[in-house]
Amino acid sequence: MLRDYQIEMKTRLMEAWKAHRSVMVQMPTGTGKTHLLASVVSEFVSSAGSGVWLIAHRRELVAQMEETLAKYGIRREDTPVRVMSVQWLSRHWNEAGDAPGLIVIDEAHHALAASYTEMWKRYPAAKKLGVTATPCRLNRRGFTELFEVLVTSWSIAEFIEKGVLSVFDYVSIRPGSEEQRLIDGLEKRGADGDYQVKEMDAVLNRRPGIERLYRSVRQFASGKKGMVYAISIEHARRIAEYYSRRGVNAVAVDSKTPAMERKRMVEEFRHGKIEVLVNVDVFSEGFDCPDVEFVQLARPTLSLAKYLQQVGRGLRRSEGKEACMLIDNVGLYRIFGLPTQRWNWDAMFRGRMAGKGSLPGRMNCDASVTAFPVVERPAEAGGDLVMVMEHGRLLSSFREQALPDEKEQSPSCRLRAFVDKETGLWGLEKGDEMLPDVSFKEILSIKGRFAVGRLRNGCVRVLDDTGALVAELGHCCEVRLLKDDLLQVRHAGNSVSYVDLRNGRCYAVRPRVLRYGSIELLQVNRTYYSRTRQVYANTYGLPSSSIVWMGFYVKMYDGRVPSRCRRMEDGGFCCEPQVCLLEGDEERAYYLSGRLPDQSIVVMDEEGRYYHVEKGHGKRYVACNRPSDRSEDFDEAVALLRRQADERVEKHLQEEKCETERKRQRIISRSVEAVPFQIGVKWGLRTAEQILIPPVYRRILRPVGGYCAYQDSSCQWGVLTVDGRIIIRARYMEVEIDRDGTARLTLVPGKMETVKLTD
């Protein structure tokens, strides 16, 4: 049974699939990504009837996915669902069976290897779903080569606030500690851009460092069950040995641990027979043990994905678990901040930002937004660690809504109060500019772009950062600016009301802010309100999952859509009355008339005027219900819009086709440099700079004029292009290719075919 937020994510995924074939979904570790994909798979099998492949990058994840699917009644024996590792699939393409209708990639932030690219080429018609907690990479390489769009969920902070994830305490090393000085001295980087393992191991895998690790566990997690993330196999084994000698039942698990032994250790850990698992990247992903009570970070990293995957192992909720203790012995807090940061996943997905931490003193403010103010205090007099966050203070921050605005203003743009020395009254300034005609007896609150002040007559006013009047509140006892441009007002008699400063609407209870892309709604009980100047209210008691973000607008059901709103025919998608809010339009809500082939839409306002809306271009008037001439006629306008949309779609497809061909020709032009190469028993094709064809074939010969002869199995030869596209299926005893593009194909001795190769 899916929870509300999982239902919402599933609905948004289904909507994304209407416009895109390949979608990536981001959900934090511990929020049920595997259960969501199991539900999607179950529904797909029931409705589509075609096969589904679930692909993981490690064998442990394969077994875990099979167990989860079995809980949904999805078993390999009686459904067209297969769970495979990408390594197995890349070696057994011909044994994989019929082409799937859906391909699901678990831990999809790994999906940039050649095997995944090959999968996309082999099965272009299949829908694709990538699931990950961290859609980012150290090298800033995005995922848009494989996935067209990213659908993101709530932040870790929101999941904790709503009780889905566990609260935590966080301790970290002091800025000037011995450990921090050693880490700051690490200079070498590995091939992936992270700290070099060899150098880390040489510097940190020493007796004093391991003793400090043990003291930290004894001080903050004595008697608790937890996980330690180590640098190397030797480091993990030394930590486990040291802990065990001092009465902590610890074992080391690494890639060399036999599978059966590893399974036994994990089961004993789950049942409490083992207190501490020390591992080397084995349990960064896919490991599910909710009652982990502490996580110790003993491996420096610059990888945001690695950091969040590791701390996420401790944030799953379980019965009797008050909080998780995060023990940061390598100063990752000073590189990434707390796990409750808000990360700019879309920028990382598109390759505009690296999933990489900033070294101390150079925190990347574009990548994330601090979830609340942090005050460090010594965890123990003279100790190695400082207390960064306690779970009680974490919850208080949520209750008090202490989260700052997502778009922090620079100091030069912030509102500040100043007192006039002659009059003793208070004014406001923004940077070096004084706001005109502002004169208060006292300033009650300043937050973001709003300020609240009390006049000499006792009345209270709210002004924005231009000095414009936002709200006149009269006499009130207490006023407080909250996050998200909300205002709390306490009246005489102790009654409380809330004001939306975007439009001045007043609410008797505090609204819940819902975000869909850049659009916000307020929820009060079962009613949803827009934050536009003309407030729209949806009173149908819809579940939040029925409100759908479409990339540049939000749509929702509303049976009050007037009959005068014309519906588009011949491909329009409005099968039910819907209202939408447009990105960047702060004025009003609109009635949805229909969607065009290029995903742009037509909407109508209250006055019966119709607008064409394209992503990134705003709205444009096209027609009305009472046209003065044919140019304003709805049918004429829609017919023209549809022709233009068809042309744009065709142009886009042609551009994509041309770009694909240009890339292909670049590859072909370099084919003279390409040579076959072998990994294991399989052959591929590569140049000095890149792999053109991954090693998945029994044999590949040198290319001739952009074509290669390849062998799929014994005495089965065919022809493919140097970019990996199969031109002639492998079924011939012998293949010879001439430079003029002619191929001589021997089916059996004495029987030869000659064909002209074309793409």
Image (tube, rainbow, N blue to C red):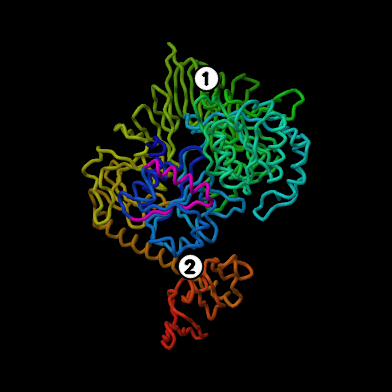
Crowd rating for badge 2 (residues with CA inside 10 Å; few <14, some 14–19, many 20+)? few
* In the image: residue 328, left or right of residue 502: right
Residue found at the very far left of the displayed protein: 563
Residue 725 drawn at (x, y percent): 47, 70
Q: Quadrant of residue 10?
A: top left
- 390 versus 658 height, above or below: above
Question: Label 2, on which residue?
Answer: 659
- Residue 390, which numbered label? none
Q: Which residues are magenta?
A: 50-72
Quick one: 347 or 589, which is closer to the camera?
A: 347
Of the two numbered discs 1 and 2 in the rendering, the one whose residue sits closer to the viewer: 2
Quick one: 280 or 302, which is closer to the camera?
A: 280
- Residue 454, which numbered label? 1
Q: Mark 2: which secondary structure? A: helix
Callout 2, which amino acid?
A: Glu
Please tell me whether residue 556 belongs to the stretch shown in magenta: no
Is residue 20 among what the camera can see?
A: no
Residue 591 drawn at (x, y percent): 30, 43
Crowd rating for badge 1 (residues with CA inside 10 Å; few <14, some 14–19, many 20+)? many
Q: Residues under labels 1 and 2: Cα distance?
A: 62 Å
* In the image: residue 199, left or right of residue 583: right
Quick one: 252 or 339, which is closer to the camera?
A: 252
- 342 versus 44 height, above or below: above
Callout 1, which amino acid?
A: Arg
Is residue 45 among what the camera can see?
A: yes
Residue 26 drawn at (x, y percent): 48, 44
Quick one: 437 or 83, which is closer to the camera?
A: 83
Q: Considering the image in quadrants, where does the N terminus appear?
A: top left
Residue found at the very far bottom of the displayed protein: 750
